[in-house]
Image (cartoon, rainbow, N blue to C red):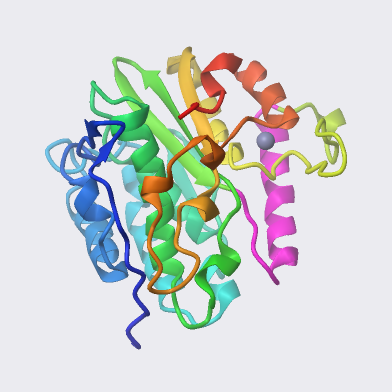
Amino acid sequence: MESPPVVDIDVDSFINGQPLLPAFNGKVDMTAAFKWSRYNILEFFDKITAQPGPRGYDVEAGAQKSLDAVVTAIHTLVNSGTPQTSIFLPKQLDVWYYNTKFRIETIFELVGWIFSVTGFSPSNANRNNYYYPIAALYCVFWRRLTENSAIDPPIKHDPNVAQITWFKVGSNWRICVSSTLDGIGLKPYKDAAQLRRQDVLIASGLLPKTMKNTSLVPTPNPQMFGHCAETIPWLYINSILKSVSAASAEGFALQPKLILPDKYKGAYEYARLDYRVFRPPCENCAYLLSKLGFKAQNFEPPTY
Ligand SMILES: [Zn+2]
């Protein structure tokens, strides 16, 4: 396989003076992981698959059944040659999150699933030392995996928004992270995926059937339910809501295009972290948030 172009990444190992905590069950130095190549990332996913137990990467028990299929699917996408086949899976893949199966269909969702099921968050994690950097690392990973000559420039198919939610389940903290579907030239695939996500919102009971194909977001940008980056994280959490302390859930949405390099050899602008990177929940998400029992103030963007 042709070796992909490399984007240089400049990384701060501290945010607001706080050193980054290790990720993935305490096994990965995040500062180092920001500089991984796509080969390092694929190798890392293979390692998780080989050691999914509590003494390894501690992948959520139900999800372990899907690890092989997810990592194989990522390899397939990375080795393909067109924008569409680098982002959208060629056939349906249903994966386990705890005891519920979800259809996931893009590289962004596959990578987000791995982040969402692998290990718990460190007990002293906060926005600065863990949650912002791991959300940013999620974006860096899918960017690395989609960097190939078929997608040029790389930023062309980046999602506009990613979202991370962290929450207490039992006595531990987990994250769920995913993104919107955006990009140029792939609208039919994106729209079909969005409708499927909307149907899952309805089937899960989070969205009344009467609200199908509606939006609470005022014009000029009235995107329908299912579009937002919050959709998949919140569907995952909803599936285990009985074991989750909903009032503990916190999160934020961020705009990957403001931190990822916009060209090969560009720098990752971690240092530019400020309030402009973050986005408040839209009206659709505010509706879902209250259905889930989350607290609206826990989802306000951080003010750096
Ligand atoms: Zn939204």
Q: Is residue 240 visible?
A: no
Could you say where residue 3 lies in the image, as x and y percent from the top left?
32, 84
- Whether residue 200 sits left or right of residue 271 in the image: it is right
Residue beneath the point at 55% across and 60% down: 158
| Secondary structure mostly seen in the magenta stretch | helix
> Is 121 situated above or below 264?
above
Could you say where residue 26 lies in the image, as x and y percent from the top left?
17, 37
Choose top left, top right, bottom left or bottom right for residue 153: bottom right
> Is 222 situated above or below 68?
above
> Is 219 situated above or below 73?
above
- Whether residue 286 sits left or right of residue 212 in the image: it is left
Report the front residue among 247 and 64: 247
The answer to if 177 sits in the magenta stretch is no
Q: Is residue 234 visible?
A: yes
> Is 228 situated above or below 35?
above
If the picture is divided into quarters, which one holds ligand 1?
Answer: top right
Residue beneath the point at 66% across and 18% down: 291
Q: Point out the stretch of residues depicted in magenta.
A: 180-206
